[in-house]
Amino acid sequence: MPETIDGQTGKPDTPPRPKAPTAAQIPLDRAVDVRREMAKVYREMRGGSLDTSEGGKLVYALSAIGKMIEVHELEERIRLLEDRLESSKSAPMLELRPH
């Protein structure tokens, strides 16, 4: 791949690398976000750019976040089911009579 040479220094002019998102910028609102971040940490550990001890701590924290997302989603589903059950109790019942 051709390189651009800096006219003043004579050294290759490399474009700046994109900045990695800060922890506050990484979306972790959904289970898929947590899974994606865990996979990223795993790849970094596998590739040697992240110490496995540090990566293990991150994966542990991500697992806890994932579990809280799961619990929250289950709570919401249970609440919706309970609301439906309550509203069906107040609805008039149809009585079926044989002809």
Image: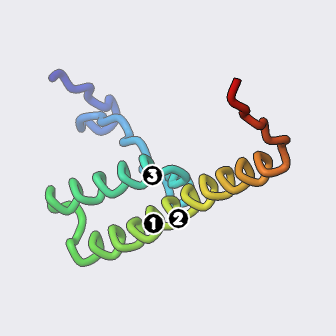
> Badge 3 local density, few (<14 within 10 Å), some, or many (20+)?
some
The kind of residue tagged 3 is Ala
The kind of residue tagged 1 is Lys
Q: Is residue 23 left or right of residue 56?
A: right
Quickly name the residue at label 3: 31
Nearer-N-terminus badge (1/3): 3
The kind of residue tagged 2 is Val
Q: Is residue 8 left or right of residue 5?
A: right
Gap in Å between the C-alphas at discs 1 and 2?
6 Å
Quickly name the residue at label 1: 67
Q: Residue at x 78, y 51 (%)?
A: 89
Q: Is residue 69 left or right of residue 99?
A: left
Query: Does dot 2 land on a helix, a strand or a loop?
Result: helix
The answer to which of 84 and 55 lies nearer the viewer is 84
Tell me where residue 60 appears, x and y as whole percent: 35, 73
Gap in Å between the C-alphas at discs 1 and 3?
9 Å
Nearer-N-terminus badge (2/3): 3
Tell me where residue 29 appears, x and y as whole percent: 55, 52
Question: Do the CB atoms of the residues marked 1 and 2 lie less than 8 Å apart?
Answer: yes
Which marked residue is nearer to the observer: mark 2 or mark 3? 2
Tell me where residue 67 appears, x and y as whole percent: 45, 66
Q: Quadrant of the C terminus?
A: top right
Q: Residue at x 52, y 66 (%)?
A: 68
Quickly name the residue at label 2: 71
Query: Does dot 3 land on a helix, a strand or a loop?
Result: helix
Q: How many marks?
A: 3
